[in-house]
Amino acid sequence: MEITANPTPQEITSLVGREVYSNNGVFVGQVEDLRLDLDSERVTGLALSQLNGELFKDRARGARGVLIPYRWVRAVGDVILVNDVVERLKEPEEEAAV
């Protein structure tokens, strides 16, 4: 899997359907939709579905998906890499127990 910075603009719809992984290689979910700021013409978030049940078991019970901020995106290629979501979602008492 090769991930390179692509200076050529892409259609934002090309992100839909891509798998999302954390920096540690943990599957997070699949892009279902995008959140846009029309005033600044920027993508501000990724709406994910087909979530990794282990990551979101306590946070997204019964939810069809989650919205993650686009600032978490580290790289876009065949897949999308985001900052380590696992660490960001842990409760403080879970971190102390690890």
Image (spheres, helix red, strand yellow):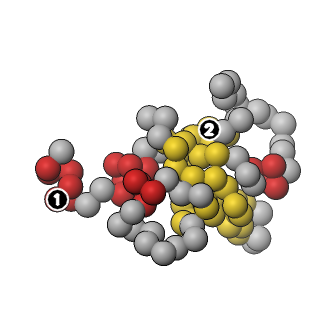
Q: Is residue 73 above or below residue 92?
A: above
Q: Amino acid at mark 2?
A: Ala
Q: Nearer the viewer, mark 1 or mark 2?
A: 1
Q: Nearer the viewer, residue 65 or 39?
A: 65
Q: Where is residue 58 shown, x and y percent of the image?
A: 35, 66
Residue behind mark 1: 93
Q: Where is residue 15 shown, x and y percent of the image?
A: 75, 50
Task: Farthest residue to the top: give it.
Answer: 2
In space, the residues marked 1 and 2 are separated at their CA atoms by 30 Å
Q: Is residue 46 visible?
A: yes
Tell me the crowding category of disc 1: few under 14, some 14 to 19, or many 20 or more residues within 10 angstroms, Cα based. Answer: few
Taking the spot 21% from the left edge, 51% from the top edge, the residue there is 95
Mark 1 vs 2: CB contact within 8 A:
no
Q: Where is residue 97 shown, x and y percent of the image?
A: 14, 50
Say the numbered circle drawn on residue 75.
2
Q: Where is residue 49 shown, x and y percent of the image?
A: 61, 61
Q: Is residue 45 visible?
A: no
> In the picture, which quadrant includes the N terminus?
top right
- In this rendering, position of residue 93 left or right of residue 37: left
Q: Nearer the viewer, residue 51 or 13?
A: 51
> In the picture, which quadrant includes the C terminus?
top left
The residue tagged with tag 2: helix, strand or loop? Answer: strand
Q: Is residue 64 above or below residue 43?
A: below
Sequence-first disc among 1 and 2: 2
- Residue 35 figure quarter: bottom right
